Image: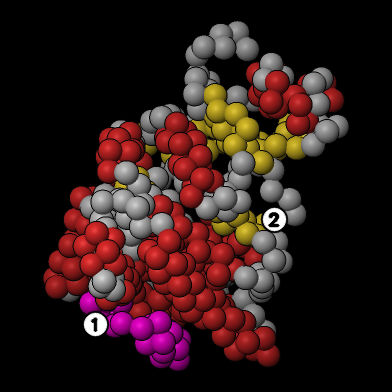
Amino acid sequence: MDNPDQYRPLSPEELAERLSTVPAIAGRIGSDPAGWQVKEVGDGNLNLVFIVRGPKGSVIVKQALPYVRLVGDSWPLPLYRAFYENHALVRQARRDPGAVPEVYHFDETQALIVMEFLSPHKILRRKLIDGETVGGLGGFLGRFCARTAFRGSELSMKSADKKADVGLFSGNVEIPAITEALVFTDPYYGAEMNHHTEGLDPVVSGLRSDARLKARVQRLLMKFASNTETMVHGDLHSGSIMSTSDESKVIDPEFVQYGPMGFDLGMLVANFLMAYFSQPAHRYPSELAGYQDWLLSVIDEVFTEFEAEFRRLWETERTGMLYPAALFEDQGQSSADACAALLAEIRTDAHGFCGIEMHRRTLSLAHNADFEDIEDTVLKRRLEARNLEMGAELVRTSETLGSTERLLDLARRFNAKDIL
């Protein structure tokens, strides 16, 4: 490169030149870049993604772009998001070892992260569209959410360390602002970048004319923007998980911030529900019921394992300033009821965030392939209508819904409805 100290989106040739000087990279893929193969494979909304292959092995390189790739340079974005993603991956690896790709190198000038190449892993969303199952998926994701939520909070962390971390990540301003707009605000009015399937207008109008629902959404936005309970992934969905038939890893935490404990859980479950509602367009009738049942079983396992792991951590790693043993166990009193009450609050928030995400992904920018890949417009809008109406029901009833069983019953009920 002509000026290595100046940022520029890298070509495959420039990337190889830059990485060849990094011993940690050369040791993994080979020291001579002439023997490397570099291919740009990114298909996401924000970044360049390269696979670099050499005689010794392969790595993935992710470089931030100074704009939203989905939109173009008319929507600029700060390069510092790579800095925060790197910090997030380091913390997630510590809080749930093995759950995220290993980071080998971070180049702050070029806003790029070099990390473990996941193979034969495949983006989970595509596996769900293709009708593939993943062993242990719900348990893995439930434990990941519990471990990162608990260990990133003052239930576990020293208060000074937690406050320093909140201060560090508070600099990631413009990325969470995308969530605040696209997730919590834009779906509920005629925002410029909104779009939805032809024929959905009656359902969309109903949502946007419901002042009580929008007030509830804004209350959850207030929690998201103001509550720094724990470090959240910030964009946990089936497109930010890579899986084989029996192993998964969580990727892409560039939307990281400190936020409510129920946020990641709610966003994750919403994407499984959208996969569930979209299945009639992707499966033969003989396969449909069995695969939809599997998707609901994953949701059940996510919540079950989240609560079981959270309780285990409560009993074994509650070393922070919150709910100290000095107030409970040291006085011969159980803290189990306090843990149960906190879990109930997390579940309530998760249900609300879940409903909002179901709206965002069908009305705002950046829709899910689960629905977008459906070519039959009539079928697509019928399935999206079920998704939108269940999302609204979740927002309205999140404080009273309660159990996973009731959540899954709700999904089955809306799956049988003919709304449009």
Query: Which image quarter holds the N terminus?
Result: top right
Q: Earlier in the sequence, mark 1 or mark 2?
A: 2
Disc 2 marks a residue whose amino acid type is: His
Does residue 326 show up?
Answer: yes
Front one among 280 and 31? 31
**Magenta span: chief secondary structure:** helix
In the image, residue 416 lies in the stretch drawn in magenta = yes
User: Residue 294 in the image: x percent, y percent?
Assistant: 59, 81
Q: Nearer the viewer, residue 358 or 400?
A: 400
| Relative vertical location of residue 413 with respect to residue 104 in this rendering, above or below | below
The vertical placement of 131 against 402, above or below, is: above
Q: Which residues are magenta?
A: 393-420
Badge 1 amino acid: Thr
Residue 240 in the figure: left or right of residue 11: left
Q: Are marks 1 and 2 in contact (CB under 8 Å)?
A: no
- Residue at numbered disc 2: 121
Name the residue beneath numbered marker 1: 400
Q: Which residue is rendered at x = 40% and y = 76% of the image?
A: 387
Task: State the mark number for residue 306.
Answer: none
Callout 2: SS: loop
Q: Residue at x 61, y 41 (%)?
A: 102
User: In what element is the residue under mark 1?
Assistant: helix
Please name the colour scheme applied to the rendered image.
Answer: secondary structure
Q: Quadrant of residue 74?
A: top left
Q: Is residue 224 visible?
A: no
